[in-house]
Amino acid sequence: MEALWYNPVYRETVFVVLLFIFAMGTIVFLLRKKNAQWLAAWASIKSWLFAAPMILFILGLPPGWTLVSLTVLSVLGSKTFFQLTGMYHRSYFVWLSYVGIIGLAYLIYWDLPRVYDLMPMIFLGGICFIPLLRNNYIHMIQYIGLSLISFCFLGWAFLHLGRIALMDSGAFLLIYIVILTEFSENVLLIASKVIGKFKPFSRITTKRTFEAFVLSFILTLILAWGMRHLLPIRSPRFWLAAGTVACFGGVLGDLVMTVIRRDLGIKQVGAFIIGRGDFLRRMDRLIFVAPLYYYALKYLMTGHVI
């Protein structure tokens, strides 16, 4: 398949997306000193001023290169997770995780979905041999559990984006769901500082209110409708499904990773290019969005998910 850069629709989409990001960035930059909310919004958006052009360039390459890029991101996310958990020095678990992620990319490329779906169990079986090979039992349940979490979330779940990339109009579908997910999350964070008192997960995070989530959900659905031209089928059920997955899946992924971070007493490792949050924080909201969106698309397109 040829690069999408030869597709005029893709070039037009890239232009519109970048224009929107830079326009919003200019507005937020001018208002950043007004109050803490605008300053937080600027911290969030400025990293995308640098990341968005690179992401859109990669998506414009032939699908195989997009899959390679997503695999690299998956490995980097796994590396960050092992650094967070203090497991980075446990090289047997770390390297087997990397090999497993590369294996997932291989299965995607050669279209072996049944084996791909079995990979979490295959990986679990593989890492259970490490204590036997090392003739050691100390902390091994902890290492096995954390390795499996990393592989399932940052490998198997995240790389469903690679499965989407190889679909017809895959690059457009990826742009669509990533924009919706980021939009939903940022609206939720900003609105939570202004409206709402009910915090359903107050012991995990105090930065999200129920009222702000409802507002974020409504605005995300409106954006999903407004951007439905990126979908191969513009039926309401497609953009409704995408908006719902982006909103609920993004929140779920962020909350799950927040639980892990707070349990470990760690906030972040390094910075994501320039701006708020580390590398893993840019991935966590996609770990549920990616598989849910993939299977929703499969069902809506074919009537089944297998």
Image (cartoon, helix red, strand yellow):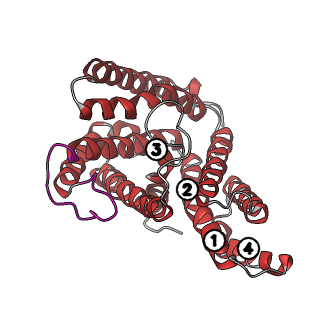
Q: Residue at x 27, y 47 (%)?
A: 188
Per the rendering, the mark at residue 120 is: 1
Specify few, some or many for label 4: CA neighbours under 10 Å numbering under 14, 14-19, or 20 or more.
Answer: many
Q: Distance between the residues labelled 4 and 1?
A: 11 Å
Residue bearing mark 3? 173
Q: Earlier in the sequence, mark 3 or mark 2?
A: 2
Q: How far apart are marks 2 and 1 (CA)?
A: 13 Å
Q: Which of marks 2 and 1 is nearer the N terminus?
A: 1
Q: How far apart are marks 3 and 4 (CA)?
A: 34 Å
Magenta residues (range) = 192-208
Q: Which of marks 1 and 3 is nearer the N terminus?
A: 1
Q: Residue at x 54, y 32 (%)?
A: 273
Q: Distance between the residues labelled 3 and 2?
A: 12 Å
Q: Which residue is drawn at 43% across and 37% down?
A: 276
What amino acid is found at the position of numbered circle 4 in the picture? Ile
Per the rendering, the mark at residue 160 is: 2
Q: In this view, does 289 lie above or below 14?
A: below
Q: Earlier in the sequence, mark 4 or mark 1?
A: 1
Towards the viewer: 258 or 72: 258
Single out the mark in the foreground, 3 or 2.
2
What amino acid is found at the position of numbered circle 2 in the picture? His
Q: Earlier in the sequence, mark 3 or mark 4?
A: 4
Residue bearing mark 4? 127
